[in-house]
């Protein structure tokens, strides 16, 4: 893994922790909305499950990136810096964010199928385009 300067890694950690917390809240709200559907079809379960996966992955990402920001802070005690597992936190934070993003896009893509076939095709197409663009940006 590429060695990044501590100041740069702290900024990345703060940004990704904030974004992950926001998106986790969105995913949780999405679950709540799906669970209030009076007569859901089986697709609603898949939507809620993928949104729950996104929320959990984002929460994990928040914890990992916040830990990195705490450990790399200039005023952090030496004991904290010695016991930190920065490589593991970067891997967990990054994977949590990526799993969260794709799970959220999956839940958005499936959500249209709860209402109608036409809306399902529309949301699925939008999700595929979004996932493709995200993959292109990441890679």
Image: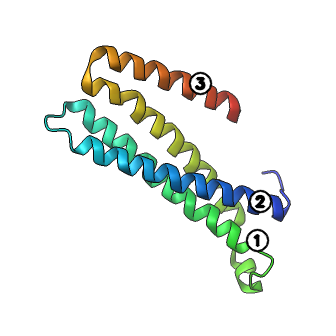
Q: Quadrant of residue 36?
A: top left
Looking at the rendered image, the quarter that the C terminus falls into is top right
| Residue behind mark 3 | 132
Evaluate if marks 3 and 2 touch, with contact meaning CB atoms under 8 Å apart: no
Q: Residues within 10 Å of mark 3 (few under 14, many from 20)?
A: few
Does residue 45 sit above or below 55 in this rendering?
above
| Residue behind mark 1 | 72
Using the image, tell me which numbered label, if any, was put on residue 9.
2
**Residue sitting at 64 percent across and 69 percent down?**
67
Evaluate if marks 2 and 1 touch, with contact meaning CB atoms under 8 Å apart: yes
Q: Is residue 92 visible?
A: no
| Mark 1 vs 3, N-terminal side | 1
Q: Find the distance from the CA under tag 2 to the CA under tag 1.
A: 8 Å
Evaluate if marks 1 and 3 touch, with contact meaning CB atoms under 8 Å apart: no
Residue 46 placement, left or right of 64: left
Q: Find the distance from the CA under tag 3 to the CA under tag 2.
A: 27 Å
Q: Residue furthest top?
A: 118
Q: Residue furthest left?
A: 39
Does residue 14 sit above or below 104 in this rendering?
below
Q: Nearer the viewer, residue 88 or 28?
A: 28
**Residue sitting at 83 percent across and 56 percent down?**
4
Q: Position of residue 100 (x, y in %)?
A: 51, 45
Tell me the colour scheme of the image. Answer: rainbow
Q: Position of residue 114 (x, y in %)?
A: 26, 27
Q: Find the distance from the CA under tag 1 to the CA under tag 3.
A: 34 Å
| Mark 3 vs 2, N-terminal side | 2
Does residue 90 sit above or below 123 in this rendering?
below
Q: Residues within 10 Å of mark 2 (few under 14, many from 20)?
A: some
- Secondary structure at badge 2 equals helix
Q: Position of residue 98 (x, y in %)?
A: 58, 43
| Mark 2 vs 1, N-terminal side | 2
């Amino acid at each position: 893994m590429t060695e990044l300067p501590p100041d740069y890694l702290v900024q990345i950690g703060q940004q990704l922790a904030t974004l992950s917390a926001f998106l986790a809240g969105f995913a949780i709200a999405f679950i709540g909305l799906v669970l209030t559907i009076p007569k859901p079809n089986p697709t609603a379960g898949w939507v809620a499950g993928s949104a729950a996966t996104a929320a959990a992955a984002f929460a994990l990402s928040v914890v990992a990136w916040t830990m990195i920001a705490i450990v790399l802070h200039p005023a952090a005690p030496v004991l904290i810096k010695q016991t930190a597992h920065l490589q593991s936190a970067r891997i967990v934070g990054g994977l949590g964010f990526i799993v969260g993003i794709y799970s959220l896009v999956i839940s958005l893509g499936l959500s249209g199928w709860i209402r109608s076939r036409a809306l399902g095709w529309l949301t699925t197409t939008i999700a595929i385009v979004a996932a493709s663009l995200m993959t292109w940006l990441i890679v």
